[in-house]
Image (tube, rainbow, N blue to C red):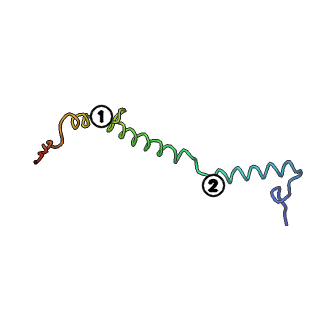
């Protein structure tokens, strides 16, 4: 049986620790996804969603296109007069 350098154990403990660290780093790169693949779409959706919300309701809590001001300026239903009998 022929022995190669890969079959021989490491010569010293420092070399063993280096091999373990290299293997752990390689496994981590393969198993843990890049967080940017999740964070970029999430951030873009957040900006679009809250941007539309802001444009709809504005900074003062009112409708940005004046819908609230129109509703306050006119009466929704005419007031009824109360008649007292007696």
The local secondary structure at tag 1 comes to loop
Residue drawn 68% across the image and 54% down it: 27
Percent position (x, y) of residue 61? 35, 36
Is residue 59 or residue 78 the one in the foreground?
78
Q: Earlier in the sequence, mark 1 or mark 2?
A: 2
54 and 5: which one is in front? Answer: 54
Q: How many marks?
A: 2
What percent of the width, then of the height, locates residue 67? 24, 37
The quarter of the rendered structure image containing the N terminus is bottom right
Q: Residue furthest toward the bottom?
A: 1
Residue at coordinates 84% horizontally, 49% vertically from top-left?
15
Asked whether the beta carbons under mark 1 and mark 2 sit within 8 Å of each other, the answer is no
Spatial distance from mark 1 to mark 2, Cα to Cα?
A: 47 Å
- Please tell me which residue lies in front, 67 or 84: 84
Indicate the quadrant where residue 62 lies: top left
Question: Horizontal and vertical percent for residue 3?
Answer: 84, 61
Q: Mark 1 highlights which residue? A: 64
Q: Is residue 10 left or right of residue 62?
A: right
Residue depicted at 82% across the width and 60% down the height: 7
**Callout 2: SS:** helix
* Direction from residue 8 to residue 54 in the image, left or right: left
User: Residue 77: which disc?
Assistant: none
Q: Is residue 15 above or below residue 50?
A: below
Which residue does the numbered mark 2 point to in the structure image?
31
- Residue sitting at the far right: 12
Mark 2 neighbour density, 10 Å: few (under 14) some (14–19) many (20 or more): few
Q: Position of residue 25 (x, y in %)?
A: 70, 49
Q: Residue at x 83, y 55 (%)?
A: 5
Local packing at callout 1 (Cα closer than 10 Å; few below 14, some 14-19, many 20+) is: some
């Amino acid at each position: 049986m022929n022995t190669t350098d890969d079959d021989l154990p490491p010569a010293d403990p420092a070399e063993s620790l280096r091999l373990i660290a290299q293997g752990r780093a390689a496994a981590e790169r393969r198993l843990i996804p890049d967080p940017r693949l999740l964070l970029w779409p999430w951030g873009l959706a957040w900006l679009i969603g809250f941007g539309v919300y802001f444009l709809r309701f504005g900074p003062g809590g009112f409708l940005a296109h004046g819908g609230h001001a129109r509703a306050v300026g006119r009466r929704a239903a005419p007031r009824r007069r109360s008649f007292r009998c007696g």
